[in-house]
Image (cartoon, rainbow, N blue to C red):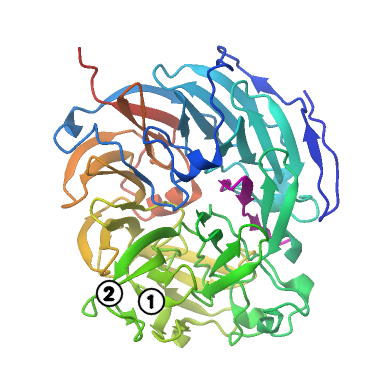
Amino acid sequence: MPQHRCSFGLLTVAVSLLAVAPTRALAQEQSVTTFVPVTDAMLQKPAPEDWLMWRRTLNGWGYSPLDQITSDNVSDLRMVWTRAMHQGSQQGTPLAYGGVLYMPNPGDIIQAIDVTTGDLIWEHHRDLPDDLGEHMGGLVTTKRAIAIHGNFILDTTGDDFLMALDATTGEMAWDTQILDYHVNPALQTAGPIVANGKVISGRSCRGSATPNACVITAHDAVTGTELWRRRTIPGPGEPGDETWGGVPFEERKHVGTWMVPSYDPELNLIYIGTSVTSPAPKFMLGGADHAHLYHNSTLALDADTGDITWYYQHLNDHWDLDHPFERLLIDTAVAPDPSTVSWINPRLRTGEDRKVMTGIPGKTGVVYTLDRETGEFLWATPTVAQNVITSIDGATGAVTENPEVIFSALGQELLACPSWAGGKDWEAGAYSPLTHTMYYPLRNACQRLLSTTDGGSTLYALAARHQLTPGTDQLGTVRAIAVETGRTKWLYEQRAATMSLVATGGGLLFGGDTNGRFRAFEQVTGDILWEVNLGSPVTGYPITFAVNGRQYVAVSTGTAANASINLRMTPELRPSAGNNLFVFALPDRP
């Protein structure tokens, strides 16, 4: 059945209220009377049993306090149910609320599933236009996350709308056009968060789009009305315009925000990261001596206005080493160990308490710890082999790139580490307050890069041959890093590339790999306590939740471009490529 939409220009708002959209396979009724609307207070302090957003909490931790499953009993974990998902690039994160899993499938298909039985409650299919691929290119079916607020499931759709579904029926309540993909195509693969009633979302603006596609937006979570939009490429006369070396505004391309932001309610700041430009080599874009703001940066935005409160640029990027990944918001003592941490602010008073933004925000695998109130650089250190950053000025945070790997002409070939598949990529790490440690799935990979407009990626003017980092045959790692000191507590390495992680109050760390293995690590030691072969790359983000006092762990497998790149570096590993959702729990006890 067709949807009813209103068209609009770039800066006006169109909302289709109570529009009719396809909701198929209605298996059973979900009780409207028992559904409790999700409030901002619930999102800011979720109940232990719930998983209400991409990383469960607005601070991006990927941590659940549930502790029924522990190191003592995790070996008894059993599969409760599984079900096939729809085809396409699969990187979904389910939401868990009120006994229901809300699972995004590729191609903007959203399912509501009974947690205990695996039975389908409802399934909504977005009626996506046939010409999307012509304008968007690849990855258009990817959906990493959705959000919940009030009675609505919220989705940023492949055709550049924000859509609200009734959480109990799957019927569309409204949709709001964000961009006209014929003019300004932008991939909306990540999904939104809700910050004090505002739906905050970013996107990956395509190379054929104008700079007006490179926007972060806020919409009213009840009505879908647009509240503000922030462009990530400055225009003439705006701050940062001078950093583009005279490149005309309409030729400034592709500074995207293609992952999910974090939010600090106390400071009322949104933290979101940006991507490389198009093309990537800066000799093609006004010169390598220009910063090209705000690419490869952290932006701290006023949640009420979208104004930039502060920014920090992590890298002047010539190699497609984006920095859009999860930002961890933690209050901590800051005492970087100079024997292991490469770059430290000399003004830092060791042991002082700070509100920090930390973690590995980019593909380089470098940990950055910044003061999240001011953006002040505190410390940074590499975690994988990298040759693109020579130094970081501790006093200013200014990054110096390695001149030996900066392109100056077409046809140049060089070895850059890490690869544009990471290092770190969209696979999320996790933080555990039990150990005050952050855990990251990382890869030992480099790339032979050719600067070219003939073949390879025309978007970036690069062609790549991915390879293992010289000196190792172990591609995948999980690294445990102390938040306070920056020391590595333990390092796990293996042949297959590692994927997203979740930490629990039971002292466990769950995560999978591209060879289909899904396992539980002990947080303190890194010991593997439980493992299962799910058959296909573990491309989805694992979560844990509880219903009626029973803790569950959910994770999904499938196909994803990054997993395919990594499997080509380990050709002896030959998993299948099935999109499936799996749910585990301890055996029922009488």
Circle 1 residue? 378
- Of the numbered discs 1 and 2, the one sitting upstream in the chain is 2
Q: Are marks 1 and 2 in contact (CB under 8 Å)?
A: yes
Magenta highlight range: 190-210
In depth, the one of 337 and 65 nearer the eye is: 65
In depth, the one of 86 and 430 nearer the eye is: 430
What's the CA distance linking mark 1 and mark 2? 9 Å
Q: Is residue 339 above or below residue 214?
A: below
Q: Is residue 67 above or below residue 349?
A: above
Circle 2 residue? 336
Residue sitting farthest toward the left: 72
Q: Residues within 10 Å of mark 2 (few under 14, many from 20)?
A: many
The circle drawn on residue 136 is none
Q: Residue at x 69, y 47 (%)?
A: 219
Question: Does residue 412 show up?
Answer: yes
> What type is the residue that disc 1 sits on?
Leu
Picture coordinates of residue 411, whole percent (x, y): 57, 78
